[in-house]
Image (cartoon, grey):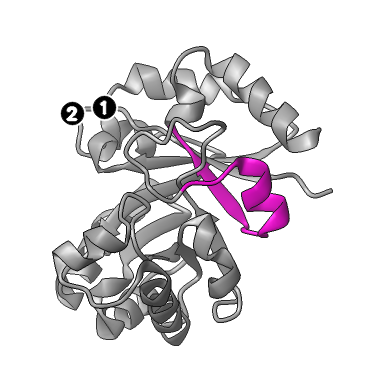
């Protein structure tokens, strides 16, 4: 069996907490990358911390969503960080997606579909007339058209996305139990990876809250039992 691929979300503004997460998650049982979002990168010491990381798979969850020129300028401003994966909202439009992909170099551009904190009722509130499923299918088609390297979607939509999008699929909203917190569309690690076939899962609070090493052991046991 190939090593399960896990992005660990460093959802903090504390560099000491991020360092603890990295040091506490060393294992040869999993292929691990580290996801940093706006909270961390925009913190006082966060950007510098990421710039000094070596031999790590870095996933910058920036979720760029702007006009094409601004997105490309933002991309150029972070090329010193040695990022492997970078998220952009597919709803930025096909022109922006194509241009940022063209200028991405070695950075893998990851299209974000519909946030896992949203459900059909939320979409109606925003003004969409599609269901989550149909909207994600539509977004997957745009990601394919723009030749993006990867896509982010809930594990609930993986079976539909895989029919359209043949590159990497990354699934957030992963939980060990029924504590969904602010997520709506969630899934267990084992089902997301082995039954549904996503390439990467993203785990944050379920792993980084409390005793990280114990939580990591729990994750490994869950995946290999």
Q: What residue is rendered at 50% in x and 44% in y?
A: 202
Dot 1 alpha-carbon crowd within 10 angstroms: few under 14, some 14 to 19, many 20 or more: some
Badge 1 marks a residue whose secondary structure is loop
Residue highlighted by disc 2: 44
Q: Is residue 122 left or right of residue 151?
A: left
Badge 2 marks a residue whose secondary structure is loop
Give the vertical position of 106 relative to 41 (above or below). Answer: below
Q: Residue 20: x, y in percent? A: 46, 17
Q: Is residue 45 left or right of residue 127?
A: right
Label 2 and label 1: CA atoms lie apart by 8 Å
Q: Is residue 205 left or right of residue 89?
A: right
Please say whether residue 202 is one of the residues in the magenta stretch. yes
Seen from the viewer's position, the closer of residues 197 and 34 is 197
Numbered range of the magenta stretch: 186-204
Residue highlighted by disc 1: 13
- 2 and 1 marks in contact (CB < 8 Å): yes
Tell me if I can see residue 64 in this picture. no
Residue 182 position by quadrant:
top left
Tell me if I can see residue 157 in this picture. yes
The quadrant in which the C terminus is found is: top right
Q: What residue is rendered at 15% in x and 71% in y?
A: 127
Give the vertical position of 8 relative to 169 (above or below). Answer: above
Q: Is residue 218 left or right of residue 85?
A: right
């Amino acid at each position: 069996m190939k090593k399960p691929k896990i992005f660990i979300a460093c959802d903090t503004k504390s560099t000491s907490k991020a360092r603890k997460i990295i040091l506490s998650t060393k294992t040869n049982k999993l292929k691990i990358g580290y996801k940093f979002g706006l909270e961390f990168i925009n913190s006082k010491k966060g950007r510098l911390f990421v710039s000094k990381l070596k031999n790590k798979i870095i996933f910058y969850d920036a979720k760029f969503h702007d006009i094409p020129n601004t997105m490309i300028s933002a991309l150029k401003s972070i090329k010193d960080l040695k990022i492997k994966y970078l998220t952009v909202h597919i709803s930025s439009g096909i022109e922006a997606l194509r241009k940022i992909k063209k200028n991405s170099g070695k950075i893998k551009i990851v299209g974000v579909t519909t946030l896992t904190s949203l459900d059909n009722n939320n979409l109606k509130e925003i003004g969409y007339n599609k269901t989550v499923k149909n909207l994600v299918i539509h977004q997957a088609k745009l990601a394919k058209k723009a030749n993006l390297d990867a896509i982010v979607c809930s594990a609930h939509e993986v079976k539909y996305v895989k029919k359209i999008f043949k590159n990497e699929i990354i699934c957030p909203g992963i939980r060990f139990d029924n504590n969904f917190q602010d997520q709506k569309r969630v899934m267990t690690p084992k089902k997301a990876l082995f039954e549904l076939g996503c390439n990467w899962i993203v785990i944050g609070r379920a792993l980084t809250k409390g005793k990280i090493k114990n939580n990591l052991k729990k994750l490994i046991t869950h995946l290999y039992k």
